[in-house]
Image (tube, coloured by chain):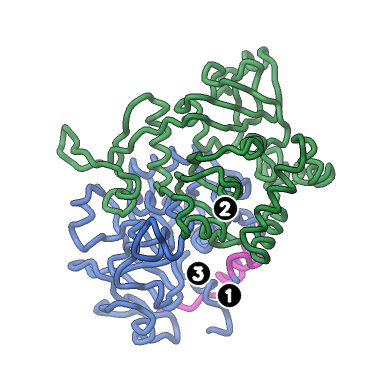
Amino acid sequence: MALVRELLRQRRRGLTLSRNLTCTEGELLMAAGAVERVVTAWMSIGLPWGVSKILRHYVESGRVALEEWSHLALGLRFRAGAMGVPFLPSLTMLGSDLVAVGGTKTIQDPYTGATLAAVPALFPDVALLHVQRADPFGNCQIDGYPHMDTDIARAAATVLVTTEELITEEDTRRHPDRTVIPGFVVDALVHVPFGSFPHECYGLYEADFEHFAAYTAAIDARGPAAVGEYLERYVYGPASFPDYLDLFGRDHLALQRRRARELTEP
Amino acid sequence: MSGRCNAAELLAVVASRQLRDDTMVFAGVGVPLLAAALARRRHAPRLTLVIEGGIIGPEIAPGRLPISTNEMRAGRRATMLPGITDAFLFAQRGFVDVGFMGGAQIDRYGNLNTSTIGADYWKPTVRLPGTGGANDIASLCREVIIVTPHEKRRFVPRVDFLTSPGWLAGDGSRAAAGLLFGRVSRVVTTLGVLGFDPATRCMRIEATHPGVSADTIRANTGFELGQAERVETTEPPSDDELLMLRALDPERRFLG
Protein backbone atom coordinates (compact mmCIF):
# COMPACT_ATOMS: atom_id res chain seq x y z
CA MET A 1 0.00 0.00 0.00
CA ALA A 2 2.92 2.37 0.71
CA LEU A 3 4.10 1.87 -2.89
CA VAL A 4 0.61 2.25 -4.37
CA ARG A 5 0.13 5.39 -2.29
CA GLU A 6 3.33 6.86 -3.73
CA LEU A 7 2.30 5.87 -7.28
CA LEU A 8 -0.95 7.77 -6.73
CA ARG A 9 0.85 10.79 -5.23
CA GLN A 10 3.08 11.00 -8.31
CA ARG A 11 -0.14 11.28 -10.38
CA ARG A 12 0.93 8.63 -12.86
CA ARG A 13 -1.35 8.11 -15.89
CA GLY A 14 -1.98 5.46 -18.53
CA LEU A 15 -0.92 2.47 -16.42
CA THR A 16 -1.92 -1.17 -16.82
CA LEU A 17 -2.43 -2.86 -13.45
CA SER A 18 -1.95 -6.63 -13.37
CA ARG A 19 -2.77 -8.55 -10.27
CA ASN A 20 -4.82 -11.68 -9.54
CA LEU A 21 -6.98 -10.34 -6.78
CA THR A 22 -7.80 -6.68 -7.12
CA CYS A 23 -9.17 -4.82 -4.10
CA THR A 24 -9.21 -1.20 -2.88
CA GLU A 25 -5.89 -0.41 -4.61
CA GLY A 26 -7.57 -1.11 -7.97
CA GLU A 27 -10.47 1.17 -7.11
CA LEU A 28 -8.12 3.97 -5.98
CA LEU A 29 -6.05 3.70 -9.17
CA MET A 30 -9.23 3.74 -11.29
CA ALA A 31 -10.75 6.73 -9.47
CA ALA A 32 -7.46 8.67 -9.63
CA GLY A 33 -7.36 8.17 -13.41
CA ALA A 34 -4.04 6.31 -13.11
CA VAL A 35 -5.01 3.05 -14.86
CA GLU A 36 -6.60 2.49 -18.23
CA ARG A 37 -6.44 -1.31 -18.16
CA VAL A 38 -6.70 -3.86 -15.36
CA VAL A 39 -5.51 -7.43 -15.99
CA THR A 40 -6.99 -9.59 -13.25
CA ALA A 41 -8.95 -12.69 -12.29
CA TRP A 42 -11.25 -11.09 -9.73
CA MET A 43 -12.05 -7.65 -8.42
CA SER A 44 -14.08 -6.78 -5.30
CA ILE A 45 -13.46 -5.45 -1.81
CA GLY A 46 -14.58 -8.79 -0.37
CA LEU A 47 -17.55 -11.11 -0.36
CA PRO A 48 -19.64 -9.34 2.33
CA TRP A 49 -19.63 -6.10 0.28
CA GLY A 50 -20.82 -7.67 -2.96
CA VAL A 51 -20.08 -6.40 -6.46
CA SER A 52 -17.85 -3.32 -6.44
CA LYS A 53 -19.72 -0.15 -7.45
CA ILE A 54 -16.43 1.44 -8.51
CA LEU A 55 -15.56 -1.51 -10.77
CA ARG A 56 -19.04 -1.23 -12.31
CA HIS A 57 -18.81 2.55 -12.71
CA TYR A 58 -15.47 2.57 -14.53
CA VAL A 59 -15.77 -0.64 -16.58
CA GLU A 60 -19.41 -0.34 -17.66
CA SER A 61 -18.78 3.23 -18.88
CA GLY A 62 -15.77 2.02 -20.89
CA ARG A 63 -13.30 4.26 -19.04
CA VAL A 64 -11.23 1.30 -17.83
CA ALA A 65 -10.84 -2.00 -19.71
CA LEU A 66 -10.93 -5.09 -17.55
CA GLU A 67 -9.02 -7.99 -19.10
CA GLU A 68 -10.02 -11.17 -17.30
CA TRP A 69 -7.88 -14.31 -16.92
CA SER A 70 -8.41 -17.29 -14.64
CA HIS A 71 -6.26 -17.47 -11.51
CA LEU A 72 -4.14 -20.28 -12.88
CA ALA A 73 -3.77 -18.69 -16.31
CA LEU A 74 -2.59 -15.38 -14.85
CA GLY A 75 -0.35 -17.29 -12.42
CA LEU A 76 1.18 -19.18 -15.33
CA ARG A 77 1.68 -15.90 -17.21
CA PHE A 78 3.86 -14.67 -14.33
CA ARG A 79 5.55 -18.07 -14.05
CA ALA A 80 6.37 -18.14 -17.76
CA GLY A 81 7.83 -14.66 -17.30
CA ALA A 82 9.79 -15.88 -14.28
CA MET A 83 11.11 -18.83 -16.32
CA GLY A 84 12.03 -16.65 -19.28
CA VAL A 85 9.91 -18.66 -21.74
CA PRO A 86 7.31 -17.13 -24.11
CA PHE A 87 4.38 -19.26 -22.94
CA LEU A 88 3.39 -22.26 -20.85
CA PRO A 89 0.97 -25.02 -21.90
CA SER A 90 -2.04 -25.56 -19.67
CA LEU A 91 -5.33 -27.42 -19.47
CA THR A 92 -7.21 -24.44 -18.05
CA MET A 93 -9.62 -21.94 -19.68
CA LEU A 94 -10.18 -24.26 -22.69
CA GLY A 95 -13.67 -24.05 -24.18
CA SER A 96 -14.55 -20.90 -22.20
CA ASP A 97 -15.11 -17.32 -23.38
CA LEU A 98 -12.03 -16.25 -21.38
CA VAL A 99 -9.84 -17.55 -24.22
CA ALA A 100 -11.04 -14.76 -26.53
CA VAL A 101 -10.85 -11.97 -23.90
CA GLY A 102 -7.09 -12.18 -23.47
CA GLY A 103 -6.38 -13.53 -26.97
CA THR A 104 -5.05 -16.85 -25.66
CA LYS A 105 -4.00 -19.18 -28.45
CA THR A 106 -4.28 -22.95 -28.35
CA ILE A 107 -1.56 -25.29 -29.56
CA GLN A 108 -1.39 -28.97 -30.45
CA ASP A 109 0.78 -31.13 -28.20
CA PRO A 110 3.63 -32.14 -30.58
CA TYR A 111 3.71 -35.63 -29.00
CA THR A 112 0.02 -36.57 -28.77
CA GLY A 113 -1.83 -33.94 -30.83
CA ALA A 114 -3.98 -32.93 -27.85
CA THR A 115 -5.23 -29.33 -27.60
CA LEU A 116 -3.61 -27.11 -24.95
CA ALA A 117 -3.90 -23.47 -23.98
CA ALA A 118 -0.63 -21.61 -24.67
CA VAL A 119 -0.71 -19.05 -21.87
CA PRO A 120 1.55 -16.13 -22.83
CA ALA A 121 4.29 -14.85 -20.52
CA LEU A 122 3.70 -11.57 -18.73
CA PHE A 123 6.76 -9.40 -18.07
CA PRO A 124 5.62 -6.43 -15.94
CA ASP A 125 7.62 -3.21 -16.34
CA VAL A 126 7.55 -2.72 -12.58
CA ALA A 127 6.69 -5.03 -9.66
CA LEU A 128 5.54 -3.52 -6.35
CA LEU A 129 5.94 -6.03 -3.51
CA HIS A 130 5.73 -6.03 0.27
CA VAL A 131 7.53 -8.67 2.39
CA GLN A 132 7.94 -9.51 6.08
CA ARG A 133 11.74 -9.34 6.13
CA ALA A 134 14.61 -8.30 3.86
CA ASP A 135 18.31 -7.57 4.27
CA PRO A 136 20.08 -4.49 2.85
CA PHE A 137 20.99 -6.43 -0.29
CA GLY A 138 17.31 -7.14 -1.06
CA ASN A 139 17.22 -10.80 -0.08
CA CYS A 140 13.58 -11.27 0.94
CA GLN A 141 11.70 -13.61 3.27
CA ILE A 142 7.92 -14.11 3.11
CA ASP A 143 5.74 -15.70 5.81
CA GLY A 144 2.33 -17.24 5.19
CA TYR A 145 0.76 -16.75 1.81
CA PRO A 146 3.33 -16.53 -0.97
CA HIS A 147 0.64 -15.44 -3.49
CA MET A 148 2.59 -15.14 -6.76
CA ASP A 149 5.21 -12.73 -5.48
CA THR A 150 8.31 -14.81 -6.22
CA ASP A 151 7.23 -15.33 -9.86
CA ILE A 152 6.27 -11.67 -10.24
CA ALA A 153 9.66 -10.56 -8.86
CA ARG A 154 11.51 -12.69 -11.41
CA ALA A 155 9.25 -11.73 -14.33
CA ALA A 156 9.33 -7.95 -13.83
CA ALA A 157 11.92 -5.63 -15.39
CA THR A 158 12.15 -3.43 -12.27
CA VAL A 159 11.37 -4.68 -8.75
CA LEU A 160 10.53 -2.33 -5.87
CA VAL A 161 10.13 -3.92 -2.44
CA THR A 162 8.94 -2.59 0.91
CA THR A 163 9.65 -4.63 4.03
CA GLU A 164 8.17 -4.80 7.52
CA GLU A 165 11.53 -5.61 9.06
CA LEU A 166 15.11 -4.94 8.00
CA ILE A 167 17.38 -7.89 8.87
CA THR A 168 21.13 -8.23 8.53
CA GLU A 169 23.11 -10.08 5.87
CA GLU A 170 24.16 -12.41 8.69
CA ASP A 171 20.47 -13.24 9.42
CA THR A 172 20.03 -14.16 5.75
CA ARG A 173 23.14 -16.37 5.76
CA ARG A 174 21.92 -18.19 8.88
CA HIS A 175 18.61 -19.14 7.17
CA PRO A 176 19.28 -19.17 3.41
CA ASP A 177 16.35 -21.58 2.94
CA ARG A 178 14.05 -18.72 3.92
CA THR A 179 15.15 -16.46 1.04
CA VAL A 180 12.42 -16.61 -1.61
CA ILE A 181 13.31 -13.48 -3.59
CA PRO A 182 17.06 -13.09 -4.12
CA GLY A 183 18.63 -9.66 -3.85
CA PHE A 184 19.89 -9.76 -7.44
CA VAL A 185 16.34 -9.42 -8.82
CA VAL A 186 15.47 -6.51 -6.51
CA ASP A 187 16.16 -2.94 -7.66
CA ALA A 188 15.12 -0.95 -4.61
CA LEU A 189 14.19 -1.75 -1.02
CA VAL A 190 12.46 0.49 1.54
CA HIS A 191 11.85 -0.27 5.22
CA VAL A 192 8.13 0.48 5.77
CA PRO A 193 6.46 -1.07 8.84
CA PHE A 194 2.68 -1.48 8.25
CA GLY A 195 3.49 -1.03 4.56
CA SER A 196 0.44 -2.99 3.38
CA PHE A 197 -2.07 -1.52 5.84
CA PRO A 198 -5.17 -1.44 5.76
CA HIS A 199 -4.61 -4.76 3.99
CA GLU A 200 -3.16 -7.64 5.98
CA CYS A 201 0.41 -8.74 6.44
CA TYR A 202 0.37 -12.42 7.35
CA GLY A 203 1.12 -13.02 11.03
CA LEU A 204 1.78 -9.30 11.71
CA TYR A 205 -1.51 -7.43 11.34
CA GLU A 206 -5.02 -8.22 10.23
CA ALA A 207 -6.82 -6.50 7.36
CA ASP A 208 -8.90 -3.62 8.70
CA PHE A 209 -12.41 -4.82 7.84
CA GLU A 210 -14.03 -1.94 9.74
CA HIS A 211 -12.09 0.46 7.51
CA PHE A 212 -13.29 -1.34 4.35
CA ALA A 213 -16.87 -1.29 5.69
CA ALA A 214 -16.66 2.50 6.24
CA TYR A 215 -15.09 2.95 2.78
CA THR A 216 -17.84 0.97 1.03
CA ALA A 217 -20.57 2.64 3.13
CA ALA A 218 -19.31 6.04 1.94
CA ILE A 219 -19.48 4.82 -1.69
CA ASP A 220 -22.99 3.47 -1.10
CA ALA A 221 -24.03 6.87 0.27
CA ARG A 222 -22.22 9.26 -2.08
CA GLY A 223 -21.20 7.24 -5.14
CA PRO A 224 -17.77 7.37 -6.82
CA ALA A 225 -17.15 10.87 -5.40
CA ALA A 226 -16.53 9.15 -2.06
CA VAL A 227 -13.34 7.61 -3.50
CA GLY A 228 -12.12 11.09 -4.42
CA GLU A 229 -12.66 12.18 -0.80
CA TYR A 230 -10.84 9.06 0.38
CA LEU A 231 -7.87 9.85 -1.89
CA GLU A 232 -7.65 13.37 -0.47
CA ARG A 233 -7.78 12.15 3.12
CA TYR A 234 -5.53 9.07 2.96
CA VAL A 235 -3.30 9.56 -0.10
CA TYR A 236 -2.78 13.18 -1.16
CA GLY A 237 -3.24 14.71 2.30
CA PRO A 238 -0.69 12.97 4.59
CA ALA A 239 2.81 13.99 3.50
CA SER A 240 4.55 10.82 4.72
CA PHE A 241 3.64 7.21 5.42
CA PRO A 242 3.90 7.70 9.21
CA ASP A 243 1.47 10.65 8.83
CA TYR A 244 -0.86 8.29 6.96
CA LEU A 245 -0.63 5.67 9.73
CA ASP A 246 -1.42 8.38 12.32
CA LEU A 247 -4.90 8.63 10.75
CA PHE A 248 -5.55 5.11 12.06
CA GLY A 249 -3.92 5.68 15.45
CA ARG A 250 -1.36 3.70 17.41
CA ASP A 251 -3.95 1.82 19.52
CA HIS A 252 -5.80 0.66 16.44
CA LEU A 253 -2.63 -0.63 14.79
CA ALA A 254 -1.72 -2.46 18.02
CA LEU A 255 -5.17 -4.09 18.02
CA GLN A 256 -4.66 -5.27 14.41
CA ARG A 257 -1.35 -6.81 15.51
CA ARG A 258 -3.02 -8.70 18.38
CA ARG A 259 -5.73 -9.96 16.04
CA ALA A 260 -3.13 -11.31 13.61
CA ARG A 261 -1.30 -13.12 16.41
CA GLU A 262 -4.54 -14.75 17.59
CA LEU A 263 -5.40 -15.85 14.04
CA THR A 264 -2.03 -17.41 13.27
CA GLU A 265 -1.39 -19.08 16.62
CA PRO A 266 -2.20 -22.77 16.28
CA MET B 1 -39.72 -27.22 7.26
CA SER B 2 -39.42 -23.56 6.27
CA GLY B 3 -40.04 -22.83 9.92
CA ARG B 4 -37.03 -24.91 10.94
CA CYS B 5 -34.36 -23.49 8.67
CA ASN B 6 -33.90 -20.86 5.96
CA ALA B 7 -32.91 -21.35 2.32
CA ALA B 8 -29.18 -20.79 2.89
CA GLU B 9 -29.12 -23.33 5.74
CA LEU B 10 -30.96 -25.93 3.66
CA LEU B 11 -28.53 -25.31 0.79
CA ALA B 12 -25.45 -25.67 3.00
CA VAL B 13 -26.71 -28.87 4.67
CA VAL B 14 -27.73 -30.61 1.43
CA ALA B 15 -24.46 -29.54 -0.21
CA SER B 16 -22.40 -30.87 2.72
CA ARG B 17 -23.96 -34.32 2.27
CA GLN B 18 -22.51 -34.54 -1.25
CA LEU B 19 -18.95 -34.68 0.12
CA ARG B 20 -17.25 -37.96 1.04
CA ASP B 21 -14.55 -38.65 3.59
CA ASP B 22 -10.91 -39.02 2.46
CA THR B 23 -11.31 -36.74 -0.55
CA MET B 24 -10.10 -33.25 -1.52
CA VAL B 25 -12.54 -30.42 -2.22
CA PHE B 26 -11.89 -27.02 -3.77
CA ALA B 27 -14.42 -24.79 -2.01
CA GLY B 28 -15.37 -21.18 -2.75
CA VAL B 29 -15.76 -18.77 0.17
CA GLY B 30 -19.37 -18.43 1.38
CA VAL B 31 -21.95 -21.23 1.41
CA PRO B 32 -19.68 -23.77 -0.41
CA LEU B 33 -16.94 -23.36 2.22
CA LEU B 34 -19.49 -23.51 5.05
CA ALA B 35 -20.88 -26.74 3.58
CA ALA B 36 -17.40 -28.24 3.31
CA ALA B 37 -16.53 -27.18 6.88
CA LEU B 38 -19.79 -28.78 8.09
CA ALA B 39 -19.01 -32.04 6.25
CA ARG B 40 -15.56 -32.07 7.86
CA ARG B 41 -16.96 -31.65 11.35
CA ARG B 42 -19.79 -34.10 10.87
CA HIS B 43 -19.28 -37.07 8.53
CA ALA B 44 -16.02 -36.46 6.65
CA PRO B 45 -13.25 -35.72 9.18
CA ARG B 46 -10.51 -36.58 6.63
CA LEU B 47 -11.93 -34.25 3.97
CA THR B 48 -9.15 -31.90 2.81
CA LEU B 49 -10.25 -28.37 1.94
CA VAL B 50 -8.44 -26.42 -0.74
CA ILE B 51 -9.06 -22.66 -0.92
CA GLU B 52 -8.11 -20.73 -4.01
CA GLY B 53 -6.02 -18.14 -2.20
CA GLY B 54 -3.41 -20.94 -2.20
CA ILE B 55 -4.34 -22.89 0.94
CA ILE B 56 -4.47 -26.64 1.57
CA GLY B 57 -6.03 -28.39 4.56
CA PRO B 58 -7.23 -25.49 6.77
CA GLU B 59 -9.38 -26.10 9.82
CA ILE B 60 -12.03 -23.41 9.69
CA ALA B 61 -12.86 -22.25 13.23
CA PRO B 62 -16.49 -21.71 14.29
CA GLY B 63 -17.19 -17.97 14.38
CA ARG B 64 -14.06 -17.23 12.36
CA LEU B 65 -15.21 -17.80 8.82
CA PRO B 66 -13.02 -16.17 6.21
CA ILE B 67 -14.57 -13.43 4.09
CA SER B 68 -12.01 -13.81 1.34
CA THR B 69 -9.88 -16.58 -0.11
CA ASN B 70 -6.58 -15.15 1.05
CA GLU B 71 -6.81 -13.83 4.56
CA MET B 72 -5.51 -15.36 7.78
CA ARG B 73 -8.87 -16.92 8.75
CA ALA B 74 -8.87 -18.94 5.51
CA GLY B 75 -5.49 -20.48 6.27
CA ARG B 76 -6.05 -21.38 9.92
CA ARG B 77 -4.14 -24.55 10.86
CA ALA B 78 -3.54 -25.34 7.18
CA THR B 79 -1.16 -28.14 6.22
CA MET B 80 0.36 -26.22 3.29
CA LEU B 81 0.35 -22.70 1.84
CA PRO B 82 1.60 -23.34 -1.69
CA GLY B 83 0.40 -20.07 -3.25
CA ILE B 84 -2.33 -19.58 -5.81
CA THR B 85 -0.61 -20.94 -8.93
CA ASP B 86 0.59 -24.15 -7.27
CA ALA B 87 -2.75 -24.79 -5.53
CA PHE B 88 -4.34 -24.94 -8.99
CA LEU B 89 -1.47 -26.96 -10.43
CA PHE B 90 -2.36 -29.68 -7.89
CA ALA B 91 -5.82 -29.69 -9.48
CA GLN B 92 -4.37 -29.75 -13.02
CA ARG B 93 -2.33 -32.79 -11.98
CA GLY B 94 -5.59 -34.51 -10.95
CA PHE B 95 -5.33 -34.46 -7.16
CA VAL B 96 -8.57 -32.59 -6.42
CA ASP B 97 -11.69 -34.75 -6.33
CA VAL B 98 -14.45 -32.18 -6.08
CA GLY B 99 -14.94 -28.51 -6.92
CA PHE B 100 -17.72 -26.76 -5.08
CA MET B 101 -18.91 -23.54 -6.73
CA GLY B 102 -21.69 -21.12 -7.62
CA GLY B 103 -22.36 -18.48 -10.28
CA ALA B 104 -24.55 -15.56 -11.32
CA GLN B 105 -25.91 -17.44 -14.36
CA ILE B 106 -26.10 -21.15 -15.16
CA ASP B 107 -27.36 -22.85 -18.34
CA ARG B 108 -28.77 -26.32 -19.08
CA TYR B 109 -25.28 -27.78 -19.56
CA GLY B 110 -24.04 -26.45 -16.22
CA ASN B 111 -21.90 -23.71 -17.78
CA LEU B 112 -21.47 -20.76 -15.41
CA ASN B 113 -21.10 -17.01 -15.78
CA THR B 114 -19.44 -14.85 -13.11
CA SER B 115 -18.01 -12.22 -15.48
CA THR B 116 -20.42 -9.93 -17.31
CA ILE B 117 -24.13 -9.48 -17.96
CA GLY B 118 -24.95 -8.15 -21.43
CA ALA B 119 -24.17 -9.12 -25.02
CA ASP B 120 -20.71 -7.50 -25.34
CA TYR B 121 -17.94 -8.43 -22.85
CA TRP B 122 -16.16 -5.09 -23.36
CA LYS B 123 -19.39 -3.05 -22.92
CA PRO B 124 -21.19 -4.92 -20.13
CA THR B 125 -24.56 -3.98 -18.66
CA VAL B 126 -23.30 -5.33 -15.34
CA ARG B 127 -19.63 -5.99 -14.59
CA LEU B 128 -19.36 -8.84 -12.06
CA PRO B 129 -16.19 -9.61 -10.00
CA GLY B 130 -14.89 -12.19 -12.51
CA THR B 131 -13.74 -15.79 -12.56
CA GLY B 132 -11.16 -15.79 -9.80
CA GLY B 133 -10.41 -19.51 -9.73
CA ALA B 134 -13.89 -20.58 -10.84
CA ASN B 135 -12.81 -21.38 -14.39
CA ASP B 136 -9.83 -23.40 -13.12
CA ILE B 137 -11.99 -25.33 -10.64
CA ALA B 138 -14.54 -26.16 -13.38
CA SER B 139 -11.77 -27.09 -15.83
CA LEU B 140 -9.48 -29.09 -13.55
CA CYS B 141 -11.35 -30.79 -10.67
CA ARG B 142 -12.41 -34.38 -11.29
CA GLU B 143 -16.01 -33.58 -10.40
CA VAL B 144 -17.82 -30.26 -10.02
CA ILE B 145 -20.85 -29.71 -7.82
CA ILE B 146 -22.64 -26.39 -8.28
CA VAL B 147 -24.24 -24.86 -5.18
CA THR B 148 -26.69 -22.03 -5.87
CA PRO B 149 -29.96 -20.35 -4.92
CA HIS B 150 -32.65 -21.47 -7.39
CA GLU B 151 -33.98 -18.42 -9.24
CA LYS B 152 -35.31 -18.06 -12.77
CA ARG B 153 -32.95 -15.15 -13.53
CA ARG B 154 -29.97 -17.41 -12.71
CA PHE B 155 -31.12 -20.49 -14.62
CA VAL B 156 -30.97 -19.08 -18.16
CA PRO B 157 -31.15 -20.74 -21.61
CA ARG B 158 -27.75 -19.21 -22.54
CA VAL B 159 -25.15 -17.65 -20.27
CA ASP B 160 -24.17 -14.13 -21.45
CA PHE B 161 -20.51 -15.07 -20.97
CA LEU B 162 -19.14 -18.57 -20.46
CA THR B 163 -16.72 -18.11 -17.57
CA SER B 164 -16.56 -21.71 -16.31
CA PRO B 165 -17.17 -24.81 -18.42
CA GLY B 166 -19.83 -27.34 -17.49
CA TRP B 167 -20.60 -29.78 -20.29
CA LEU B 168 -20.14 -26.88 -22.82
CA ALA B 169 -22.56 -27.80 -25.66
CA GLY B 170 -23.31 -31.36 -24.58
CA ASP B 171 -21.57 -34.69 -24.48
CA GLY B 172 -18.20 -34.77 -26.21
CA SER B 173 -17.57 -31.02 -26.42
CA ARG B 174 -15.58 -30.86 -23.16
CA ALA B 175 -13.10 -33.41 -24.43
CA ALA B 176 -13.07 -31.80 -27.90
CA ALA B 177 -12.07 -28.46 -26.34
CA GLY B 178 -9.05 -30.16 -24.74
CA LEU B 179 -10.38 -30.60 -21.20
CA LEU B 180 -8.84 -33.96 -20.38
CA PHE B 181 -10.95 -34.83 -17.36
CA GLY B 182 -13.63 -33.37 -15.12
CA ARG B 183 -17.41 -33.27 -15.23
CA VAL B 184 -20.21 -31.33 -13.61
CA SER B 185 -22.26 -33.94 -11.80
CA ARG B 186 -24.87 -32.11 -9.73
CA VAL B 187 -26.48 -28.77 -9.06
CA VAL B 188 -27.60 -28.39 -5.45
CA THR B 189 -30.15 -25.58 -5.14
CA THR B 190 -32.58 -24.13 -2.64
CA LEU B 191 -35.39 -26.15 -4.32
CA GLY B 192 -33.82 -29.51 -5.10
CA VAL B 193 -30.90 -31.46 -6.48
CA LEU B 194 -30.39 -31.56 -10.25
CA GLY B 195 -28.15 -33.79 -12.31
CA PHE B 196 -27.38 -34.25 -16.00
CA ASP B 197 -28.87 -36.75 -18.46
CA PRO B 198 -26.06 -39.24 -19.27
CA ALA B 199 -26.87 -39.15 -23.00
CA THR B 200 -27.58 -35.46 -23.69
CA ARG B 201 -25.77 -33.87 -20.71
CA CYS B 202 -28.83 -31.62 -20.24
CA MET B 203 -29.86 -30.70 -16.70
CA ARG B 204 -32.62 -32.79 -15.10
CA ILE B 205 -34.39 -32.99 -11.76
CA GLU B 206 -33.08 -35.76 -9.49
CA ALA B 207 -34.48 -34.77 -6.08
CA THR B 208 -36.91 -32.22 -4.71
CA HIS B 209 -36.60 -30.67 -1.26
CA PRO B 210 -39.46 -31.41 1.20
CA GLY B 211 -42.59 -29.49 0.26
CA VAL B 212 -41.26 -28.54 -3.20
CA SER B 213 -42.78 -30.03 -6.37
CA ALA B 214 -41.02 -30.69 -9.68
CA ASP B 215 -43.40 -28.12 -11.19
CA THR B 216 -42.14 -25.46 -8.77
CA ILE B 217 -38.56 -26.22 -9.83
CA ARG B 218 -39.57 -25.93 -13.51
CA ALA B 219 -41.41 -22.64 -12.85
CA ASN B 220 -38.17 -21.24 -11.39
CA THR B 221 -35.96 -22.39 -14.27
CA GLY B 222 -35.52 -20.51 -17.56
CA PHE B 223 -35.11 -23.64 -19.70
CA GLU B 224 -36.76 -27.02 -20.13
CA LEU B 225 -35.86 -29.58 -17.48
CA GLY B 226 -36.12 -33.36 -17.79
CA GLN B 227 -36.24 -35.59 -14.77
CA ALA B 228 -34.60 -38.78 -13.61
CA GLU B 229 -36.60 -42.03 -13.73
CA ARG B 230 -37.02 -41.83 -9.97
CA VAL B 231 -37.12 -38.40 -8.36
CA GLU B 232 -36.14 -38.61 -4.71
CA THR B 233 -37.25 -36.36 -1.86
CA THR B 234 -34.44 -34.76 0.12
CA GLU B 235 -34.12 -35.84 3.75
CA PRO B 236 -34.80 -32.65 5.77
CA PRO B 237 -31.83 -31.21 7.70
CA SER B 238 -31.50 -32.88 11.08
CA ASP B 239 -31.26 -30.95 14.36
CA ASP B 240 -27.66 -32.10 14.57
CA GLU B 241 -26.75 -30.73 11.12
CA LEU B 242 -28.44 -27.40 11.81
CA LEU B 243 -26.80 -26.98 15.22
CA MET B 244 -23.33 -27.63 13.83
CA LEU B 245 -23.91 -25.36 10.84
CA ARG B 246 -25.21 -22.47 12.96
CA ALA B 247 -22.24 -22.82 15.31
CA LEU B 248 -19.90 -22.28 12.34
CA ASP B 249 -21.52 -18.96 11.39
CA PRO B 250 -22.87 -17.41 14.62
CA GLU B 251 -22.71 -13.90 13.12
CA ARG B 252 -24.82 -15.21 10.21
CA ARG B 253 -22.49 -13.70 7.63
CA PHE B 254 -23.39 -16.27 5.02
CA LEU B 255 -26.47 -17.96 6.52
CA GLY B 256 -28.58 -14.76 6.35
Task: Look at mark 3 in the image and give the residue it sits on.
Answer: B13
Please check whether the numbered discs 1 and 2 fall on a single chain: yes
Whole-number angstrom distance, CA of label 3 to CA of label 2: 21 Å
Q: CA distance from mark 1 to mark 2?
A: 29 Å
Q: The residue tagged with tag 3: helix, strand or loop?
A: helix
Q: Nearer the viewer, residue B208 or A241?
A: A241
Q: Are marks 1 and 2 in contact (CB under 8 Å)?
A: no
Query: Which one is nearer the viewer's eye here, A99 or A83?
Result: A99
Q: Mark 3 or mark 2: name the one nearer the start of the chain.
A: 3
Q: Which residue is mark 2?
A: B68
Q: Which chain is blue?
A: B
The answer to whether dots 3 and 2 both sit on one chain is: yes
Is residue B248 one of those drawn in magenta? yes
- Amino acid type, label 2: Ser
Chain letter of the residue carrying label 1: B
**Which one is closest to the eye, mark 3 or mark 2?**
2
Residues drawn in magenta: B234-255
Tell me where residue B143 sits by quadrant.
Answer: bottom left
**What SS does tag 2 mark?**
loop
Q: Are marks 1 and 3 on the same chain?
A: yes
| Left or right of B200 in this view: A221 | right
Q: CA distance from mark 1 to mark 3?
A: 11 Å
Residue B253 screen position, x and y as percent: 62, 65
Q: In the rendered image, what is the letter of the chain coloured green? A: A
Q: Give the residue number, with chain letter if any, for mark 1.
A: B239
| Amino acid type, callout 3 | Val
Q: Are marks 1 and 3 in contact (CB under 8 Å)?
A: no
Mark 1 / mark 3, whichever is N-terminal: 3
Residue at (43% x, 63% y) in the render: B102
Asked whether residue B31 appears in the rendered view, the answer is yes
